[in-house]
């Protein structure tokens, strides 16, 4: 047994300092999760990244509805289907526009219009009503 300064016998033995690796690992994981949470919050607030997925889905749906209305009232522009022209125009415009508050909805509406046009074309091809360069037929209306 080791002696202390006063000459008394030490009852407990000294142990070498061993860092608690499990605790340090958990602390590092907590810090990483907090940093990720901060960055995700910042992305959501700025409108980048995942953003508002429900709002984006509603915007795409609105683009599809607009494509249906446009194809009934004005089926063709310059010999092409109006939803195709308008949807492509909105997507290209969203790539050019710098303001994300305008570019995001324009891209959503354009992609909805393009999706509705593609759905109409696919339905027509599968039903055998498609023509080479003819207008899109939506619900029997050309």
Image: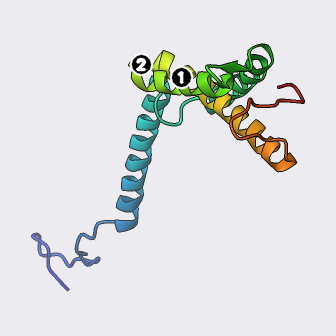
Indicate the quadrant containing the C terminus: top left, top right, bottom left or bottom right: top right
Residue at which label 1 appears: 89
* Residue at (39% x, 42% y) in the render: 35
* Residue at (72% x, 19% y) in the render: 66
Relative to 97, say whether 122 is above or below: below
Position of 36 with respect to 105 (left or right) is: left
> How many residues crowd around disc 1 within 10 Å: few (fewer than 14), some, or many (20 or more)?
some
- Which of 25 and 55 lies nearest the eye of the viewer? 55
> How many residues crowd around disc 2 within 10 Å: few (fewer than 14), some, or many (20 or more)?
few
* Residue at (35% x, 59% y) in the render: 24
Q: Secondary structure at mark 2?
A: loop
Rendering quarter of residue 11: bottom left
Position of 15 with respect to 65 (left or right) is: left
Position of 69 with respect to 77 (left or right) is: right
> Which of pointers 2 and 1 lies earlier in the amino acid sequence?
1
* Residue at (43% x, 27% y) in the render: 95
- Which of 51 and 103 lies nearest the eye of the viewer? 103
Q: Nearer the viewer, mark 2 or mark 1?
A: 1
Residue at which label 2 appears: 97
Instruction: Farthest residue to the left: give it.
Output: 5
């Amino acid at each position: 047994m080791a002696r202390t300064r006063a000459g008394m016998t030490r009852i407990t033995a000294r142990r070498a300092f061993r860092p608690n690796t499990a605790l340090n690992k958990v602390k590092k994981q907590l810090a990483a999760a907090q940093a990720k949470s901060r960055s995700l919050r910042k992305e959501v607030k700025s409108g980048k990244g995942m953003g508002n997925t429900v709002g984006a889905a509603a915007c795409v749906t609105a683009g599809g509805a607009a494509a249906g209305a446009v194809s009934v009232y004005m089926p063709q522009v310059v010999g092409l289907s109006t939803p195709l022209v308008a949807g492509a125009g909105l997507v290209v415009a969203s790539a050019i526009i710098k303001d994300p508050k305008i570019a995001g909805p324009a891209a959503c509406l354009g992609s909805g219009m393009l999706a509705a046009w593609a759905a109409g074309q696919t339905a027509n091809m599968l039903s055998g009503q498609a023509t080479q360069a003819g207008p899109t037929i939506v619900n029997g209306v050309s």
